[in-house]
Image: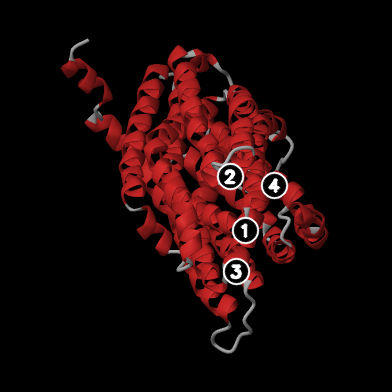
Amino acid sequence: MTVREAFRRIAPHREDARKVIHLAYPVILGMTSFTLLSLVDTAMLGRLGAAPLAASGIAGVLFFAVVFTLAGIGIGVQTLTARRFGERSEVECGRVVDSGLFLALALGLPITVAAPWIARLCAPILSQDIQVVVLGEVYLQYRFYGATFMLANWVLQGFFAGIGETRHQMVASILATGTNLVLDYTLIFGRWGLPAMGVRGAALASTIAIGVGLAYLAVVAVTPAHRTRFAILRPPISFAHWLRPILRLSLPVMGQRAISNGSWFAFFSVVARIGTIELAATNIIRSAYHVTIMLGVGMGTAAAALVGQGLGAEAPDRAERLGWEATKLAATAMGCIGILFAAFPGLILRIYTNDPAVIAAGRWPLLILGFVQAFAGIGIVLSHALQGAGNTRFVMFAELGVCATLYLPIVYVLGLRTPLGLIGAWTGEYLYWGALAATMSWKFARGGWKRIVV
């Protein structure tokens, strides 16, 4: 293969790239906006000291380990909706989202009601620092109040992504972020006559903000245009018909997310044992890191929708071509942002905190993290593409294999059993993305996903 041929393979193709970007950019903007919700929390709490910053960080990871795992039902909804939309079975798309919303309520309401008890049960495992434990319990309680909002939000996002109307996710996320920004300022610091609530205020602001985003998506979903076309919540309503297909696709996604988020929480637990300063630095790195991850998630959402629609329209080669195109775009974009991480780690850390000890602890892990962003883009997009085709089990087992045999052992050994400390713990993250990118590339290239029926 000549250099020119190799470049032609990896360079974006204008028409395919336009299709991917058309679906991806609203998701990227929306998810980035949604991630800014966490960034705003982190930046404002960073002004209160290392303990509130550490507590919100590790408690936030535990919250997502629970709720984002259950939100895997949104992937099942998106996969089925995209396939039915490609088949031009639009009424069935509405039936899928009806069943998804029923599942969101069934899974979310018990968590919302039991939020104080769940938070009290989980708090002791957050840290060995009693102050972090106390603040973390408060943060968890008020975030768990929003569990139902979060699950229903992901179901509706899955529906809109499946039918190619990703702009609604962008608007909902921008509304949520704007709401969170205002409420964070007023509730954390006690402005405009309200009491200063600190960590409690940050969590409450996030919960209300997610509710605002959900309200927008719900209103759009039941407008006459969508309700007539897709029969969303239109009698006769049958929640049972699509429950089994959604769960069949979603349970492996939940398993994959439980492994991924559980491993991420285990990583934070290791860092908490290294020290509170290191935990605060890691929370900042996580927040900055997730801004770039949203590029991959946006491209992955577009890839999943296009792959599902292509298979529904009996055009598997087009589905494959667009999946690779989304992968190239994500790897390029995330690689470019990774260069900024490597070049300006101190500047990025100062956005969040003025504490010199926290900045010093986070500088090298963030710098090195910049060099693996392209691999993260590959792994994220191809994981989503395989899930969009219905191959959710492979993604789950691949996640299990990489985390159990590589990621967690390295985090533990290098983080706690060597002088490397925080840098050693973050080494597991670098190797994780390399292994996942290689595994997903191999599976997607084999093409067996083209024959999956959902």
Q: Which residue is mark 2?
A: 231
Q: CA distance from mark 2 to mark 3?
A: 38 Å
Q: Which residue is mark 1?
A: 276
- Disc 2, disc 3: CB below 8 Å? no
Q: Decide: few, some or many residues near mark 3? Use Cα within 10 Å; few <14, some 14-19, many ≥20.
A: many
Nearest the eye: 380 or 268:
268
- Disc 4, disc 1: CB below 8 Å? no
Q: Which residue is mark 4?
A: 66
Q: Nearer the viewer, mark 4 or mark 1?
A: 1
Q: Amino acid at mark 3?
A: Ala
Q: CA distance from mark 1 to mark 3?
A: 20 Å
Q: Tag 3's secondary structure? A: helix
- Which residue is at 67% across, 47% downward? 269
**Quarter holding residue 8:** top left
The answer to which of marks 4 and 2 sits earlier in the sequence is 4
- Which residue is at 71% across, 66% downward? 131
Q: CA distance from mark 4 to mark 2?
A: 31 Å
Q: Tag 4's secondary structure? A: helix
